[in-house]
Amino acid sequence: MTHYQLLCLMALLIHICNGQFSNSRCRCVCPKDTHYTKNRNVFVKVVESSKDCNCSNIVGLPEVFCLRCQCTFETRNRSMNQGVVIFILIIFGILSLYLLYSIAEKYAKREPIRLDLTQANEHISVNPSISDRFSRFRSDWKMQLDEQRNNIYVRHKILS
């Protein structure tokens, strides 16, 4: 899919989802009355304006029952909800792309680094003071190692 097709698909999905929900509703809370209602005392219906928010329109029961009901017109801000959902989807998409990149990088064929001895000697000979220190350190270490071996195996002496 190209970017243009993906953008059109997202716009279509957003347009379809906009038609499924409404920003306004009427909510009527009535006392429980076993004669008219079995177990419901809250009635909710989608309405377009506050003029349509009355008990007879929402509940659909006789006027006697509606005298004790309290109906309120409610509106909500869906743009905040949509913003949060879109933000979460974007974060999820970025993390998914990072996961795919990590997996691809892990299994990608890498050529081993080959370093010739001539190249290694060139790197070492760049700074002679470092190579001198390293060779001195190595020779001192070998002398200490020989002395320890001599103490343990020949003289049978540990921790002098």
Image (cartoon, grey):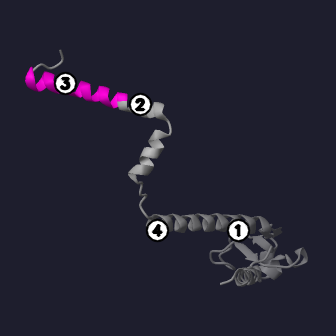
- Residue in view at x 74 percent, y 69 percent: 82
Q: Which residue is mark 2?
A: 132
Q: Which is more N-terminal, label 3 or label 1?
A: 1
Q: Main secondary structure of the magenta part?
A: helix
Q: Amino acid at mark 2?
A: Asp
Q: Quadrant of residue 59?
A: bottom right
Q: Which residue is mark 4?
A: 108
Q: CA distance from mark 4 to mark 2?
A: 40 Å
| Labels 4 and 1: the sequence-earlier one | 1
Mark 3 and mark 2 in contact? Answer it, CB < 8 Å: no
- Residue 30 can be seen in this image: yes
Q: Determine whether the residue tagged by mark 1 lies in a helix, strand or loop.
A: helix
Q: Residue at x 20, y 23 (%)?
A: 147
- In this picture, residue 146 sits left or right of residue 83: left
Q: Position of residue 121 (x, y in %)?
A: 42, 45
- Looking at the rendering, the stretch of residues picked out in magenta corresponds to 136-155
Question: In this view of the protein, which residue sits in the foreground, 128 or 33?
Answer: 128
Disc 4 and disc 3 in contact, CB within 8 angstroms:
no
Q: Is residue 142 magenta?
A: yes
User: Who comes first in sequence, dot 1 or dot 2?
Assistant: 1
Residue behind mark 3: 148
Q: Earlier in the sequence, mark 3 or mark 2?
A: 2
Q: Residues within 10 Å of mark 4 (few under 14, many from 20)?
A: few
Kind of residue sitting beneath label 4: Ala
